[in-house]
Amino acid sequence: MQSVTPQQIRSSFINASRSEAAKLSPPKDFDSLDWDNLDFLGWRDEKMPLRGYLVVPGPEGLTGIMLRAPEGGARKNRSVLCELCRDVFSKEDVLLWVARRAGQSGRDGNTVGTLICADFLCCGNVRKEPPANEINPDPAAVVLRQIEGLKDRTAQFLGRVQAKQRTRPAGYKEARPHGCGGRASLRAGQR
Ligand SMILES: [Zn+2]
């Protein structure tokens, strides 16, 4: 992605109030970020460790999403995959991050949750070449595919936060603001 300024980041959020966006701490390595190898910017707030941010470039500019991590952190075994990078080799924790929906729906308390690497290292994960094998003789091609997959799934998650999604099945229930019940924990439970 192209480099962006802290000011652009602050004004990109679709599910945070202006004061929430004003209070965020930019990534601590902000001045040395390797933008060429990032599909999005994701980080945890240094001062508010339960808060995370995803800032994603798109044809209409940046879209920022504020996320909340569960109080207790990750379970000790890494039994789930990050929904964005789906890295099977990483030993990094994966957390169920919950985002308030954009707009009125979010103000009404509706959220969506997804499993994402605890420190948002997904862009680095998908760029690691897997060992060549018979099924995937060309690791560089695998990396390109992984990058595309990461971009697609990140866009889908953004769509869910923006509530641009297909008709919901009957009986569908939104996750509660703090992740008790609802789809978010159901998804985690299925894995
Ligand atoms: Zn990931």
Image (cartoon, helix red, strand yellow):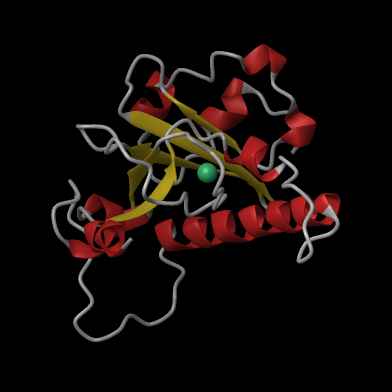
Which of the 4 image quadrants contains residue 5? top right
Q: How many marks overall?
A: 0
Which residue shows up at 62% across the image and 53% down it? Answer: 150
Horizontal and vertical percent for residue 102? Answer: 38, 53
Which residue shows up at 41% across the image and 16% down it? Answer: 46
Query: Relative to residue 11, is residue 170 depicted above or below?
Result: below
Which residue shows up at 51% across the image and 29% down it? Answer: 10
Residue 16 showing in the rendered view: no
- Given the current orientation, which residue lies at the most extreme front position? 134
Query: Relative to residue 87, is residue 124 depicted above or below?
Result: above
Horizontal and vertical percent for residue 124? Answer: 66, 35
**Along the line of sight, the residue nearer the viewer: 158 or 190:** 190
Horizontal and vertical percent for residue 162? Answer: 44, 59
In this rendering, position of residue 134 left or right of residue 25: right
Which quadrant holds the N terminus? top right
Horizontal and vertical percent for residue 6? Answer: 59, 22
